[in-house]
Amino acid sequence: MLQDLFQSPDYYNVDELLQEEHLLIRDAVRQWVKKEISPIIEDCCQQAKFPSHIIPGLGELGCFGPTIPTQYGGAGLDYISYGLMMQELERGDSGIRSTASVQGSLVMYPIFAFGSEAQKEWYLPKLAKGEFMGCFGLTEPDHGSNPAGMITNFKEDGDHVILNGAKMWISNAPFADIAVVWAKDEAGVIRGLIVERGMEGFTTPEIKDKWSLRASATGELVFDNVRVPKDNILPGVQGLKGPLSCLSSARYGISWGAVGAAMDCYDTALRYAKERVQFGRPIGGFQLIQKKLAEMVTEITKAQLMNWRLGVLKNQGKATPAQISMAKRNACEIATNIARDARQILGGMGITGEFSVMRHMMNLESVITYEGTHEVHLLITGMDVTGLDAFK
């Protein structure tokens, strides 16, 4: 069994910016990851198997919808606490963080923000505990970065609607009990619907043979004349504002999570560089290795400070979607580069399951693309600073 020796880098004493509650929450999740995730995750990835037995533990930790008010079963925490939770989960594995992110930001958040009181009271407490697991249906086979072009649609039929279409690359889909699905009504307006497993014509085939996020279950959502009660339509939003606000919430979590993966890669590379002896001394004593390590910790430190400031803005209700896009893009870029440099420091050992680096490296190739591609986030920043829309 692999021993998790992780020690968190904190070059600028960012911990001093955190409240005692933040530190307690972070340390609780960190210890849980060391105990429950690290010993099994390499085997899960090799087998391409999601460890479903961890779901109750994630619920008990409050990792499902931590910012949802306690009256609906959430933990009622602030956004820095949420970010730290995602950081620690992704330090363990991106797929584990994805499971929690989807549940909280893409399923519980839209029900809380846009759902009826009856929907909130029925679904949210069960989702918070992990009794129900959910997924989010926006991306389609032919419409990824352009969600407005979606063709999934529904037509009215008495007290129900008839839903047809398909969604692609959906985390949690193969085992989800419910799906928050975005589809066009007969007027072409995008609406959100809660689709439940067991509804006739609703299937969730799993996507196999992934080289990335192998410990996360990914699938499709297929709707073939699915009858959905009108009571399952989210009443509080119409148009792309609904799904895009969910993505902002998820992207915020990713901005912290990707830094967690980067921290793990850096910590692994640093420890290896101190222990691996070549030419009569540890390779950490050579200039080129020190250059890589110094650049790694510099980028991690900058990202930690950006995430902390973004968390403060989120808590104040001031964070903009463009600011979140910048943080998500930055975190994914530095994490991907750090994973690659860490793999080089480890040499041949870097591709083995004895170390976490190659697994993080493969996972981050998905993280850098989902919830908005690297290029799309760059153009969001460009549009924000110039006022000119490059998407048209």
Image (tube, grey):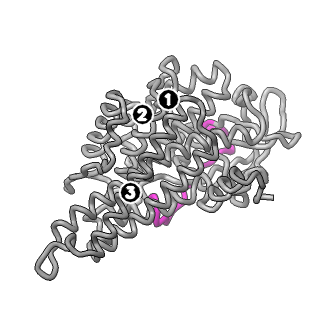
- Quadrant of the rendered image containing residue 290: bottom left
Is residue 184 in the magenta section? no
Picture coordinates of residue 324, whole percent (x, y): 58, 45
Q: Tell me the kind of residue under disc 2.
A: Ser
Q: CA distance from mark 1 to mark 2?
A: 8 Å
Q: Tell me whether the residue at label 1 lies in contact with that at label 2, contact meaning CB atoms closer than 8 angstroms.
A: yes
Picture coordinates of residue 310, whole percent (x, y): 51, 40
Compared with 101, 258 (above or below) is below
Mark 3 vs 2, N-terminal side: 2
Q: Which residue is mark 1?
A: 67
Which element carries disc 3, helix, strand or loop?
Answer: helix
Using the image, tell me which numbered label, if any, was put on residue 262.
3
Picture coordinates of residue 193, whole percent (x, y): 70, 35
User: In front: mark 1 or mark 3?
Assistant: 3
Q: Is residue 150 visible?
A: no
Q: Which residue is mark 2?
A: 81
How busy is the neighbourhood of tag 2: few (under 14 within 10 Å), some, or many (20 plus)? many
- Give the side of residue 159 with respect to residue 288, left or right: right
Using the image, tell me which numbered label, if any, was put on residue 202.
none
Viewer-side residue, 180 vs 199: 180
Viewer-side residue, 203 vs 273: 273
Q: Quadrant of the N terminus?
A: bottom left
